[in-house]
């Protein structure tokens, strides 16, 4: 019954307005059709409207029952897999009972409700178990291997796409957001083809041609804050900027939106849709969605987000079709003069493929555009927010960075934004501040993969089919690498360090992943951070607002309740 309901999505349920309204309210209009119900009713000789509604309710209840049974079976399966892995492997495991953060945890579970707890717990367990790999239980008892050591994290990342793949639960979580053809989700030859086609669009020279986007949006932010400061009741001395995370999320969204669509005017409804989808951190809800029956159909935030995402996808597809129609009426746009990412992707060609397969389809273009928003917007905004927090709470570092930026600005007169951005990208202390911010507040603190074949991790054999969790946040704050000051903000560690230069570069890249599946938009995010931070510091002195108590919340470490005070910087 579940297969029949899900496959038939073409029609609504006949002409009965009453029946149709019931279906719309329950959000099952994509699951049932008039033909299925009519056939079912005729066989049972209940063809009246009342009979059809009864059958509809019966089918829906049957579907719910099947999903609930599937969920219960999953719980039993997780319990069995946990016991099997514990009994058959030599991995150390989380104790059956233990105290973490003053609370008792049992049966191998430990708290994962926030990124900060995840990092602290892994560092504690790594120390207690004296191992960089150990077994633990995730949500609903899923058996996993936690990996905290650099050696094993590097191994898994370099084998990603071959020995290790994304679990089906991860694919189910992100497919509605980025699309099935996203470079984030496809594997094998499809992934290699997409990377070859997309790579020119994210080369440093292509991004530098769009450097005016970073500069213009950063300048607009500074102008807005100047106006707030001038109009404040404190006679322009200093003023509080509240909800910094939300402000910088909008800045990052605007930058990506301009890079994807160019100077095109976007309708108010689509702008609201973007804000609905990308300005709120609901990663925890997305992760739970495929695990709990009908969670995405019931939860109001997920329902609203789904409608907004459908509007964005439709809008983007229409823009792609308009661009293609425009190309037919004139000479093709040279890729070097393409105005935005959509033009770059439409121009891009895979030299190793032939025919139409050498170019991206309309759906592939849309999926890559949404991937750019999904993977790059909120993560960059989180990094910028915590970067501002660290600078506001460390005046010595802020002053040293300002001095480097001031010398950079007065050193020579730049002819264009591109030249200025190229030089700024090479500033050593600004680069160190970015790396240190990512070390302490990386937005992707753990990554999940599944091994498709038996693999060895630090002398322990892991059978095929188990999830491993790469604890990137714990690795970056490990005292075994950085020493006793690992939890402190110290950008100088990236310039003068006892850690080898090769290992430093590896640690700097790990937040963006390693190997063939590293973040293709890494340089875009780096330029965003540098443009915004440098623009703010050149105009304002920044302190933390004493009334705020910022918290790192959610799976990505959202900077909740973060406020700063700005004042005009004296040269």
Image (tube, rainbow, N blue to C red):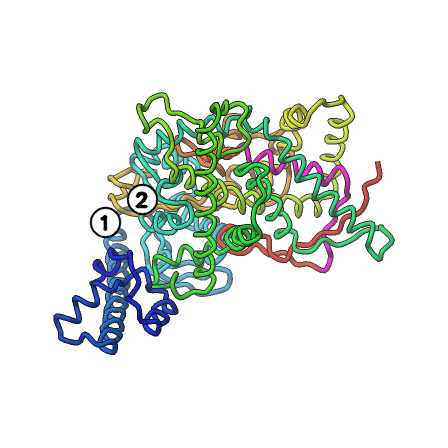
Above or below, 278 relative to 533: below
The mark that comes first in sequence, 2 or 1, is: 1
Residue 535 part of the magenta segment: yes
In what element is the residue under mark 1?
Answer: helix
Task: Compare residues 528 and 12 and report the one nearer the observer.
Answer: 12
Above or below, 74 relative to 65: above
Question: Disc count in the image?
Answer: 2
Residue 505 part of the magenta segment: no
Q: Residues within 10 Å of mark 2 (few under 14, many from 20)?
A: many
Our reading of the magenta stretch's main secondary structure is helix
Instruction: Determine if residue 383 is in view.
Output: no
Residue 179 is situated, as x and y percent measured from the top left of the image, at: 38, 45
Task: Please give the residue where the numbered disc 2 appears in the rendered image.
Answer: 450
**Residue at 69% over, 25% down:** 416
Task: Compare residues 199 and 21 and report the one nearer the observer.
Answer: 21
**Quadrant where the C terminus is found in the figure:** top right
Q: What number is the disc on residue 88? A: 1
Instruction: Determine if residue 516 is in view.
Output: yes
Task: Compare residues 90 and 24 and report the one nearer the observer.
Answer: 24
Q: Which residues are magenta?
A: 523-547
Residue 530 is situated, as x and y percent measured from the top left of the image, at: 64, 35
Residue 209 is situated, as x and y percent measured from the top left of the image, at: 59, 26
Above or below, 136 relative to 524: below
């Amino acid at each position: 019954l579940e297969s029949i309901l899900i496959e038939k999505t073409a029609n609504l349920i006949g002409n009965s307005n009453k029946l149709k309204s019931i279906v719309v309210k329950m959000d099952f209009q994509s699951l049932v059709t008039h033909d299925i119900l009519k056939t079912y009713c005729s066989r049972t000789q209940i063809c009246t409207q009342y009979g059809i509604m009864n059958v509809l309710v019966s089918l829906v209840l049957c579907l719910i029952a099947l999903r609930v049974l599937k969920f219960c079976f999953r719980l039993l399966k997780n319990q069995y897999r946990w016991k099997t892995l514990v009994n058959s492997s030599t991995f150390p495991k989380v104790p059956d009972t233990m105290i973490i953060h003053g609370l008792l945890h049992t049966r191998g579970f430990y708290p994962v409700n926030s990124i900060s707890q995840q990092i602290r717990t892994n560092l504690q367990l790594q120390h207690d178990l004296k191992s960089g790999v150990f077994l633990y239980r995730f949500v609903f008892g899923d058996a996993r291997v936690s990996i905290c050591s650099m050696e094993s994290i590097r191994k898994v990342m370099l084998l990603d796409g071959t020995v290790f793949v994304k679990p089906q639960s991860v694919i189910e979580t992100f497919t509605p957001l980025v699309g099935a053809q996203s470079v984030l989700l496809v594997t094998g030859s499809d992934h290699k083809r997409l990377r070859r086609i997309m790579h020119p669009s994210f080369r440093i020279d292509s991004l530098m041609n769009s450097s005016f986007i970073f500069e213009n949006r950063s300048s607009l932010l500074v102008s807005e804050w100047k106006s707030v400061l001038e109009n404040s009741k404190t006679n322009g001395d200093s003023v509080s900027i509240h909800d910094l995370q939300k402000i910088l999320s909008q800045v990052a969204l605007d930058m990506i939106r301009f890079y994807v669509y160019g100077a095109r005017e976007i309708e108010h409804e689509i702008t609201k849709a973007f804000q609905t989808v990308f300005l709120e951190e609901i990663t925890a809800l997305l992760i739970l969605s495929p695990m709990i029956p009908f969670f995405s159909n019931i939860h109001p935030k997920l329902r609203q987000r789904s409608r907004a995402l459908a509007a964005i996808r439709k809008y983007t597809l229409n823009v792609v079709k308009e661009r293609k129609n425009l190309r037919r009426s004139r000479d093709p746009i040279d890729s070097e003069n393409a105005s935005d990412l959509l033009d770059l992707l439409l121009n891009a060609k895979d030299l190793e493929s032939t025919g139409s397969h050498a170019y991206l389809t309309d759906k592939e273009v849309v999926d890559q555009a949404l991937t750019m928003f999904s993977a790059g917007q909120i993560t960059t905004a989180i990094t910028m927010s915590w970067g501002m927090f660290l600078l506001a709470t460390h005046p010595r570092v802020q002053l040293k960075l300002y001095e480097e930026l001031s010398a950079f600005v007065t050193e020579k007169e730049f002819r264009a934004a591109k030249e200025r951005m190229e030089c700024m990208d090479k500033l050593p202390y600004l680069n160190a501040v970015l790396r240190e911010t990512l070390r302490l507040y990386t937005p992707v603190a753990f990554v999940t993969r599944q091994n498709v074949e038996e693999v060895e991790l630090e002398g322990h054999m892991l059978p095929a089919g188990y999830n491993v969790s790469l604890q990137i946040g714990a690795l970056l704050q490990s005292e075994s690498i950085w020493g006793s000051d690992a939890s402190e903000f110290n950008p100088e560690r990236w310039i003068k360090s006892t850690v080898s230069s090769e290992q430093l570069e590896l640690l700097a890249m790990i937040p963006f992943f390693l190997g063939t599946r590293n973040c293709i938009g890494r340089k875009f995010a780096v330029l965003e951070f540098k443009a915004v931070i440098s623009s703010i510091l050149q105009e304002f002195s920044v302190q933390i607002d004493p009334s705020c108590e910022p918290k790192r919340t959610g799976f990505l470490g959202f900077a909740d309740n973060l406020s700063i005070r700005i004042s005009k910087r004296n040269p």
